[in-house]
Image: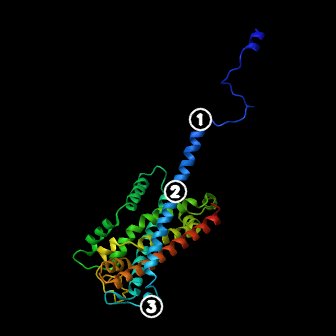
Amino acid sequence: MSELAQAAPPDPYAFDPTAPLRPSGNLRRRLFASQLLVVGAVTAAAIAVAALGVVTYEVAKHGASVLSFNFITHNASGFAGGGIAAELVGTALIALCAAVIAVPLGVLIAIYLSEFAGPRSRIARWMRLLLDLMQGLPTIIVGLLVFGLLVNHHHTSGIAGSIALSIVMLPLVARSSQEVLRLVPGHLREASDALGVARWRSIVGVVLPAALPGIVTGAILATARAAGETAPLLLCTAVFNPGQTMINVFGHGMPNIPLLILQSSEQASPESVARAWGAALVLLGAILIANVGARILLGRWRRRLGT
């Protein structure tokens, strides 16, 4: 019997731990799919960067001819002359009021979703779904909603435009703040609980200070995103005097750069079109500076937390 066992041929499917590892057909297919996915992702990123570069180059090429110190510091004169000082002030005030409305609400929503709501909370699920729907909502619908509530049968105003932009900003601030709060190390919360600190005091005194740079970063990105919106402002604060600087957001419509670009680009005068390109260059530069600064701030905060 032992002789028959010794004479039996070896099993070709038996596992040999001493044999060298060789890629199977399934592993080769997975490697090919992985490389294909990497190439596709890199190509898509390159296309996006190239598109941004083309847009930036075209705006800079057409707008650099009118860009000057007087263009930024003087108001408009007529339909084609002058600068964009009133529009700069109006855009800044509208965006600032929108941030004052949206940022506290967004941070409070993020605190509830990340710190108080349980994993099976129905309210939290509905809130997340609502935020996702708001994030994909066309801004013209937001502008139409605010127009029907605040502008119709009344008059356009800067605060109406700010409320419309705050609705656009709210899901961005809430989602970014929620992700930032998740990055706060859990041992900070555990140490606070071990000391017997109340939950709300732990959030206010420990969690929020640790997450503050990331929250500020999200707020800056959301504000920069909303500052370039045109559709809500077209419905809510489109009637204004471009030659007058206004600081009362509760009065009539306020001058702003997106509507200046739209109105100037529709004029037949070459000077008016050039003025639109210059305003577009200023707005694009402000948004790029805000985005780059926010990314730098977020990177420093993540390195400090070690994430």
Give the left or right position of residue 209, taking residue 14 as reference. Answer: left
Kind of residue sitting beneath label 2 = Thr
* Res 278 seen here: yes
Tell me: residue 177, above or below residue 278: above
Tell me: residue 74, above or below residue 169: below
- For disc 1, the marked residue is 25
Q: Name the secondary structure under disc 2.
A: helix
Q: Please tell me which residue is depicted at 25% across the width and 70% down the height of the picture.
A: 148
Placement of the C terminus among the 4 image quadrants? bottom right
Q: Please tell me which residue is depicted at 52% across the width and 61% down the height of the picture.
A: 46
* Res 108 seen here: no
Q: Which numbered tag is attached to residue 43?
A: 2
Q: Please tell me which residue is depicted at 78% across the width and 10% down the height of the picture.
A: 3
Looking at the picture, how far across and down is residue 84, in whole percent? Answer: 40, 85
Work out which residue is located at the far top of the displayed protein and give it: 1
Query: Can you tell which of label 3 and label 2 is closer to the viewer?
Result: 2
Q: Which numbered tag is attached to residue 70?
A: 3
- As measured in the structure, the alpha-carbon distance from the residue carrying label 1 to the one carrying label 2 is 27 Å
Kind of residue sitting beneath label 3 = Asn
- As measured in the structure, the alpha-carbon distance from the residue carrying label 3 to the one carrying label 2 is 42 Å
- As measured in the structure, the alpha-carbon distance from the residue carrying label 3 to the one carrying label 1 is 68 Å
* Label located before the other in sequence (1 or 2): 1
Label 2 CA crowd tier, 10 Å (few <14, some 14–19, many 20+): few
Residues at discs 3 and 1 in contact (Cβ within 8 Å) = no
